[in-house]
Image (spheres, rainbow, N blue to C red):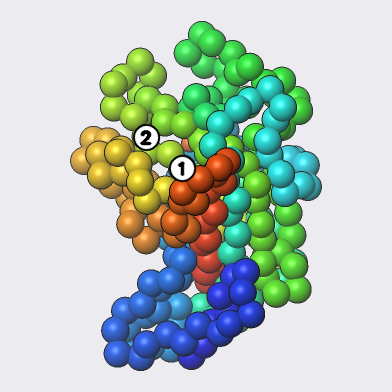
Amino acid sequence: MQLRRAGTTAALALPRSKTNEQDGVRIMSNERELIPTPQQVKGPYFLANSPFRRKLIPKELTGQKMVLSGQVLNTAGNTIAGAIVHLWVADPSGRYDNQLDSGAPSQLDPSQHKLRGRQHTNKNGCYRWIFLRPGNYPLVPGGSQKRPAHLHVLIEAPGYKSLVTQIYMPDDYWNTRDIKDGREDDFFQPELVVHLAPAVPHGKQTQVGTFNFVLSKA
Ligand SMILES: [Fe+2]
């Protein structure tokens, strides 16, 4: 089986003798099917009517710029064109644009939806986001334990189960501490980690990541 790697024209051959992980895609032990991306909790900050756009960098905010790209695939490894990919993120200080709790309103106007958007995958099933790396925020309001930086994603495509998940950065202190009440399913999972390209040693740095999503049939 071959998968086309996002952002390149090279085909990626998956080894047949062992579990393979590449930018979020895992192959099942029968070597014929890809494992669907794990579902995670949607959380309280999703809005269904976010604008169609690829860049989520409000001029009011500064932070680590990130570019994330990848493909949406089915379990047979075929790309899904026209899927709708939603992204919503916290700001670099760890607050969502529609967050009204904890007594401190977001510095962004919630009606502007500045930290969220939707886009369609192109004919090759590719998506691409530009945004500021989200910050950590307390697991429970006022608590000292924090959630690792994460991106909330919803993907919808006709004929497939909608995927609601969160994806994570590989270098966050809180990744291995992301647990609440003994429940781990809706928290950090190694298979949901973005692949980050090595940092550029000089100049302004943009973190470049890749992650491919796999949807299961409805
Ligand atoms: Fe979140």
Left or right for 117, reference 190? right
Along the viewing direction, whichever of 136 and 47 lies nearer the viewer: 136
Residue 136 horizontal/vertical position (percent)? 42, 31
Residue 129 horizontal/vertical position (percent)? 65, 51
Residue 111 horizontal/vertical position (percent)? 75, 25
Along the viewing direction, whichever of 211 and 187 lies nearer the viewer: 211
Along the viewing direction, whichever of 67 and 105 lies nearer the viewer: 67
Q: Quick check: is the Cβ at mark 2 less than 8 Å away from ligand 1? A: yes
* Mark 2: few/some/many CA within 10 Å (<14, 14-19, 20+): many
Q: Check if mark 2's residue and mark 1's residue have beta carbons within 8 Å.
A: yes
* Residue 83 is at least partly visible in this image: no
* Residue appearing at x 51%, y 61% in the figure: 211
Establish if 33 lies above or below 80.
below
Q: Which residue is mark 1?
A: 150
Quadrant including the C terminus: bottom right
Q: Which residue is mark 2?
A: 147
Left or right for 122, reference 11? right
Q: Quick check: is the Cβ at mark 1 less than 8 Å away from ligand 1? A: yes
Left or right for 59, reference 160? right
* Residue 140 is at least partly visible in this image: yes
Establish if 113 lies above or below 53.
above
